[in-house]
Amino acid sequence: MPLSHDHIRTTIDAYLARHPHECEQLGGLLDALNRTGDEIASRSTFTGHVTCGAIVVDPLGRVLHVLHLTSGKVLAPGGHTEPADESLAAAALRELHEETGIPPQAVVSWPGYEKVPLDIDIHDIDADPGNNEPGHQHFDLRFLFRLHTANEVEVVLQEEEVGGIEWRPVDKVASPSLREKLLKLPRQVEPETANASALIYNDRGEYLLHLRDYFPGRIWEPGMWSLLGGGREPQDATLEHTVRRELAEEAGLDIADLTPFGTEYASDDAGATVPIAIYAGRWNGDPRELHLTEGVMLAWFAPNDLHRLRIADTTSDLVQRHAARPPAGTTPQTELPSPEERRSASPNGTVLNVIGVHLYLERPDGTVLLGLRHPNSKFAPSTWHVLAGHCEQENAIACLIREAQEEAGLRIERQDVKLVHIVHHIDKAGDRPRMGLFFRARAWSGEPELREPDKCTEWKFWDPAALPDDLVSYTRVAIGKIQNGELYSETGWPS
């Protein structure tokens, strides 16, 4: 049956409580709601009916627009409600999925706007004689969502209704009323998180995983390997209290130092997105000695063994990322050893060098690809740099091919790669030495895409003779040497 009069009325009343100055301009909606009752949700109510839109903001602060073929206008995704819709916000998510292919679990409601629209707009719809539809009005309730980056989102357009999509900066949003409200929003709001999990590792580089009970329909991820953790309870002052309580209750475990690692996103049984605060901590004990009160067992696993387990992709990806980029306070193999360690391990004073792999991508016109690093990057924030990454447990060319695909959606074949420069560099005396390998791709497929907008905010091809001022210094040196055909350079070392 259609959405109830009470649900629609309550939603509109909550909106007007925030925007009382809009009571007069929404008078037509209020009158129609009083006249038609539940029928205001039906598309056949031609005195005017409710529609729902999804305002989706991506990690760069851009707003999703689609080209609606019937009207020829560029608008936010949205459309009519249907009898199966459980709420107005659910109708907006369904329309988002139908028109763009973006699933509900790829977005989260903007905090404070879970049940209240960001904007309500009334606009006229022209008559459609072919479908026996007279001119009427749409009362468009627009709900606000944030696109998160836990998974790559593939856009699949509803071809019969949508001609294309466009991500616009807030100041270019098509609707004036919507634009005004979006410009007033705080830009760094995060979804409220009510779950916390512990990412526990040891000095061998292994991770502690929990085999959950197999109770399908009763618990989340039955029979799967997961992290210890759970939901926040009223007595938990913070999410760190939550994860510490869960560790104690589930395994009698107390980790001295737990540090925030980030927020992950998972999907519950209903397909809704669940934000989970992740805390990382080191422990070198024997899990067989712990008193487990929930689940089947605890065990250590190396990251390379996760593919053999029944484990959620999000959990596996989280472990792999932590293993590749250890948080502050760990001592991974790539850290500079202490003087005592150097003397015992390598009598000649050898130290480990970090290997960085870099893509030198030059178009036929001679321009070179650079990416603008995110303002929050630990290394070179808001600075241009070539596409690059650190070698994991892989050879350098495999690393290059992987990073090009992950960061920019570029597909490169091994036979098309050639080493064109090596730069041995340090940032300042005493820092870890680094060996930067620059590879030229003679051929590739695809155009650069922002696959990891939390790391890179823009791709652009630059003339090597007019490179940006805010360019990583050793990258500037390497590009110049490549242009001159020189294979090796050094930067940052004391003269």
Image: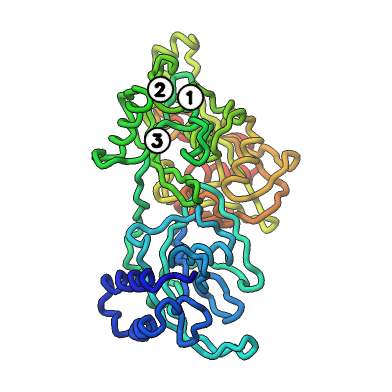
How far apart, in angstroms, are the residues tagged by discs 2 and 3?
16 Å
Q: Is residue 333 visible?
A: no
| Mark seen at residue 483 | none
Q: Position of residue 198 (x, y in %)?
A: 39, 32
Q: Which residue is mark 1?
A: 296
Q: Residue furthest front?
A: 1
Note whether 482 is above or below 183 in the view shown.
above
Marker count (numbered): 3
Identified by mark 2, the residue type is Leu
How crowded is the residue under tag 1: few (<14 C-alpha within 10 Å), some, or many (20+)? few
Q: Assign a secondary structure to mark 2.
A: loop
Which residue shows up at 66% across the image and 35% down it? Answer: 397
Task: First in sequence, mark 2 or 3: give its number.
Answer: 3
Q: Assign a secondary structure to mark 3.
A: strand
Note whether 462 is above or below 406 in the view shown.
below
How far apart, in angstroms, are the residues tagged by discs 2 and 1?
8 Å
Q: Position of residue 315 (x, y in %)?
A: 50, 36
Identified by mark 1, the residue type is Val
Identified by mark 3, the residue type is Ser
Note whether 271 is above or below 336 in the view shown.
below
For the residue pair 75 and 408, the one nearer the viewer reads as 75
| Mark seen at residue 292 | 2
